[in-house]
Amino acid sequence: MKKLICFLLISMLLLGCKQEIKATNTIQNYDSLQTKNDTEKAIKFLKEFYFSVYGSDENNEILKKKYLSERVLKRIDSLTSNENDLILDYDPFIQGQDYNGSSIKKTLKIISLGSKDKFRVSFLLFGNKDEKRTNIDIALQKNKKGNYLINCILNDEYLNFKDNFSQEEQNKFYVLDSANLKMQKNTYKISVLEKTENKNKENVQHNSNPIILYKNGKKIAQSNNLIYPYNDNCPADGFQRLVSKNNYFTIEQSYCKEFLFVSSYTTFKIDEKSGYILLHKYGEIYTDRSNPDESISDKTLTAKDFGVIKFEYVTEELLLKLL
């Protein structure tokens, strides 16, 4: 009798385990199927977005808004509201300013990044020979109606929302001067920033200004030590202007060296073959502060003198050592 009871108990336990395993497998299969369906719907949504907005060369800016979450719309609006001081001066959904709709439509690929709401959108902007694919990593979110919306661009400086980009941070700097260089394959932009607190002030010296380089709208380098720092014994104006021509751009600034006013010219060359931005030339023109009419020889050095130096390694200290 005891053996029978024991056998029945073991049988019931095994049956319960089998039912639990079966239920678990059913749930897992359902979750897997649900995830697969969600992924397919998300990819379909992104494909519709890119085909509708960028599948032709027409301006579909208004249409774009229906695919974006409220926080993305507000962020873009805050970064583009001032036409004179654009912070976001490129389209973050293509990481550029220009595109070929036919090329995007033909080359569009979308894959999951291992999460039900994160995807990589990949395409050729123009379809040129040897052109590298543009990759946009996007996070989606469902609204109250269960429809997908673009809620974040993971690999964009301004729309990744990693830093909780507050209005205060957005307003910390404005673009003091900028230059655009359209090359054969890429478009570059150089922006010199200034603190917003100095905007509209008279007789402001521009010192220690951040300089940011963009390639096809994507930030590739930043320097905070290229514009000379403030010197309270020097009435020089600091940063003067940016000048660009072909694949060269020059940063003009002024500072003081002992009893001299110095106008300096730092020229960089964009080398598309190597992908580097290189120091091309550095020159200084001198004026005696007490005797402006005195003749003083200028000094100029080129890459033949100092060799190969990348933009990110050029600082105030390095330039002063060159001469």
Image: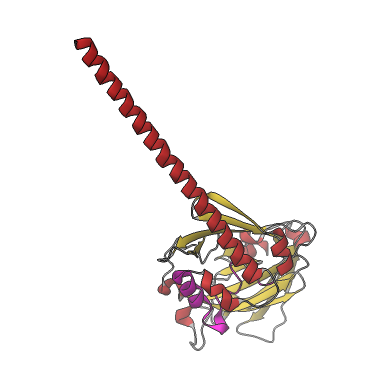
Q: Is residue 134 above or below residue 260?
A: above
**Residue 315, horizontal then vertical, whole percent:** 60, 63
Residue situated furthest bottom in the rendering: 202
Quadrant location, the C terminus = bottom right
Q: Residue furthest left?
A: 1
The verdict on residue 95 being magenta is yes
Can residue 110 be spotted in the picture?
yes
Along the viewing direction, whichever of 205 and 151 lies nearer the viewer: 151
- The span shown in magenta is 69-98
User: Is residue 176 highlighted in magenta?
Assistant: no
Q: Residue at x 41, y 70 (%)?
A: 166
Q: Based on the displayed image, in which of its 4 quarters is residue 60 positioned?
A: bottom right
Q: Where is residue 89 drawn, in percent x and y?
A: 59, 74
How far from the left and from the top, in percent, is residue 243? 69, 77
Q: Position of 60 compared to 42: left or right?
A: right
Q: Residue at x 31, y 28 (%)?
A: 16
